[in-house]
Image: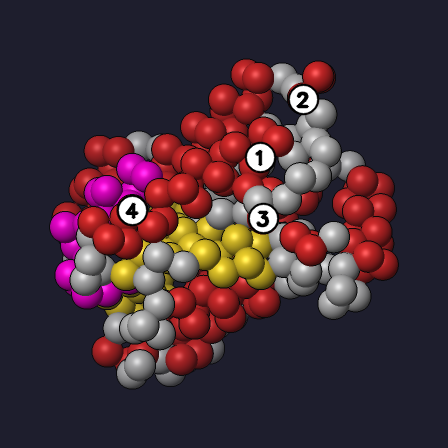
Amino acid sequence: MNWQSEKVVVLGGSSGIGLATVSRLTAAGANVVAIGRDQDKLDKALAGLEGPGRAVGEALDCTDRAALDRFFGRVGPIDHLLLTLSGGEGGGRFDELDLTALRRGFEAKVWPQLEAAQAGLPALRHDGSLTFVTAISARIANPGTAGLGAINGALECMIGSLARELAPLRVNAVSPGVIDTAWWDRFPASVKTDLFRQQAETLPVGRVGQAQDVAHALQFLMENTFMTGAIIECDGGLRLL
Ligand SMILES: NC(=O)c1ccc[n+]([C@@H]2O[C@H](COP(=O)([O-])OP(=O)(O)OC[C@H]3O[C@@H](n4cnc5c(N)ncnc54)[C@H](OP(=O)(O)O)[C@@H]3O)[C@@H](O)[C@H]2O)c1
């Protein structure tokens, strides 16, 4: 793929997996629009990126459908749409799980991704790509992750149908394992340190994932025109344990 002729929108591009993908695509030559809710954070995140491509940041809350419609109305046409918005709430053992928090987790991840995907369709090139970021919790039987699995499973269940329904648009997802990003900052530092150490000791690859690992898989799905309806597990082998 000649990235220099491609325009990409990354929703959730100010941090973590989204920012790492913006960085890769900009280095490959793409014209990228990165979305987050905080313009200052976006500007700082994008300031250090190197071309030959170009990334601009635009503040937008993807829970606001009217704002999404306005954004896609003026940004289009685009070749690729990447949805890597984070939620975060909804983890924990089921017997103690705060279902209100789980509901907020759905509201923060499932609905904005679906609203953004639907709002973005008119702007997307008919044979471009639409790529979701889910989570491996959807397909592992880890105690404490039933709620997160439900959130991400809801999205993963849609990938195949969407790939057929929206063809020739290609629809795919990457399902990450534990990745060292700001997503983990919501937990006490000791929880994060202990989990990352345990992951490094038990994962077949012997280390925790980095945002660049997932960005690499996302770029592959965007540029390989024979990939559709696929969910790539980028988890260091977590699903095998
Ligand atoms: N990190 C992991 O271990 C892991 C594992 C499995 C799956 N995932 C998934 O990977 C995706 C990316 O996570 P990450 O680890 O890269 O998290 P992150 O570093 O917290 O990045 C999340 C991004 O989403 C943006 N965002 C969140 N809500 C938004 C909204 N309503 N409107 C616009 N932008 C919004 C954030 O920007 P602002 O906050 O500035 O708005 C930020 O740019 C998420 O879907 C997450 O569930 C992560």
Secondary element under disc 3, as helix, strand or loop, is helix
| Foreground of the two, 15 or 17 | 17
Range shown magenta: 114-129
Q: Classify mark 3 as within 8 Å of ligand 1 or not, answering yes or no.
A: yes
Disc 1: residue Cβ within 8 A of ligand 1's nearest atom: yes
Q: Reading the chain from its start, which is encountered first: label 2 or label 1?
A: 2
Looking at the image, which residue is at 57% across and 44% down?
139
| Residue 99 visible in the current orientation | yes
Label of residue 94 in the image: 2
Circle nearer the viewer, 4 or 1: 4
Residue on which disc 1 sits: 148
Q: CA distance from mark 4 to mark 1?
A: 22 Å
Residue at image mark 3: 136
Q: Residues within 10 Å of mark 4 (few under 14, many from 20)?
A: few
Q: Residues within 10 Å of mark 2 (few under 14, many from 20)?
A: some
| Circle 3 residues within 10 Å: few <14, some 14–19, many ≥20 | many
Please report the residue visible at 62 percent of the width from the left and 31 percent of the height from the top.
146
Amino acid type, callout 1: Leu
